[in-house]
Each structure stands twice: as C-alpha cells, then as structure tokens.
Image (cartoon, rainbow, N blue to C red):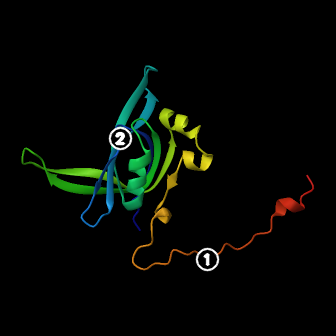
Amino acid sequence: MTVNKVQLIGRLGRDPEVRYMPNGDAVCHFSIATEEQWKDRDGNRQTRTEWHSIVLYRKLGEIAGQYLRKGGLVYIDGRIQSRKYTGKDGVERTAYEIIGNEMKMLGSKELGVKAANRPAEEAQPQATPSAMPPVGGQSSQRPAPVPVDDIDDDIPF
C-alpha cells in the first residue's frame, strides 16, 4: 500500500491566478508559506519558511480565485504531483505541486472585515469536491441520513 497525502496550513504569498482550460474547467495557481520553528543549541529561535505551489481545479479553483487573497490563512488537503518542464535556459526541470482536493479558508484581516458585514455562513466558505457538480452521469442525490436517537434528551442534567 502507498499513500500520497498532504495537509498544509499556510498563508498565501500572492493573490491566486485563475485560468481556464479549453474545455472550460478552471485551474487556480497560488503559493502558500509554512513555517517551522525550533531552538538551536544556543537557545536561539530559528525559523525556516517553506513555499508550496498549490493547484486547484474546476469549482474548487473558481472558489479559491474568488475568495482567497494574499496573506490569508488557508488549509489545503491534497497530494503531491511532479511535473517536468524545460526552463527558459533550455534545461529540463522538475516542479512539485500540491494538487488540492479540499480547501478551508481559516481567516485573514481583510476577510474578517468582510465577515462582519455578512452572515456567518457566507463569511468563510469552505469547499470540497462534494461542492462540485457530478461528473460523468453520477447522481448528485445522497441517501437521506438515518435518524439517530439523541441520548442527551434522556439525561436529566
């Protein structure tokens, strides 16, 4: 068994860039920074920043392009994918990108101001593949949830 799973929480280094493929699907690119902090042998705090290239497709990419902004805090769940390309100097290179399949906006100063003027449900939208339209004839209807007896109603305290 193998696993290719990435979970990141970081801040956007710039506003997302959304482009569209010939078939109309959105492709959103942006980068986020994560930090690692530790103390060295002398007790001095050290910090290392890692930059991660993020790619979101279809509806998830459109949502990211609409709501994410530079400096915003975001959670990304996805997988690592490598891509080979030839640089301007003619040298073949490999880029590693995080292909996101879930995104949660965790907040920013700007988003906080906007959130004060909107209902809580709209303030911090969250997007997952389930928010995307069905593909290839899949039904978008889900079975009704099975009711569960609420045991808290029976407890007298």
Q: Nearer the viewer, residue 80 or 132?
A: 132
Q: Which residue is mark 1?
A: 143
Q: CA distance from mark 1 to mark 2?
A: 38 Å
Which residue appears at 46% of the width and 44% of the height? 74
Number of numbered labels in the structure image = 2
Q: Is residue 100 visible?
A: no
Label 1 vs 2, first from the N-terminus: 2
Above or below: residue 141 compared with residue 114: below
- Provide the secondary structure element on which disc 1 rests: loop
Residue that sits furthest to the left in the current view: 90
| Apparent side of residue 39 relative to residue 17 in the rendered image (left or right) | right
**For mark 1, does the 10 Å Cα neighbourhood hold few (<14), some (14 to 19), or many (20 or more) residues?**
few
Residue that sits furthest to the bottom in the current view: 137
Q: Quadrant of the N terminus?
A: bottom left
The residue under label 2 is which amino acid type? Answer: Asp
Q: Which mark is residue 15?
A: 2
Horizontal and vertical percent position of residue 28: 33, 52
Horizontal and vertical percent position of residue 92: 12, 51
Q: Say which quarter of the image contains residue 42.
A: top left
Which residue appears at 35% of the width and 41% of the height? 15
**For mark 2, does the 10 Å Cα neighbourhood hold few (<14), some (14 to 19), or many (20 or more) residues?**
some
Which residue appears at 18% of the width and 55% of the height? 84
| Apparent side of residue 42 relative to residue 91 in the rendered image (left or right) | right
Horizontal and vertical percent position of residue 29: 31, 49
Residue that sits furthest to the front in the current view: 117
Q: Nearer the viewer, residue 110 or 51?
A: 110
Above or below: residue 67 compared with residue 134: above
The residue under label 1 is which amino acid type? Answer: Pro
Horizontal and vertical percent position of residue 148: 76, 69
Q: Say which quarter of the image contains residue 88.
A: top left
Discs 1, 2 touching: Cβ within 8 Å? no
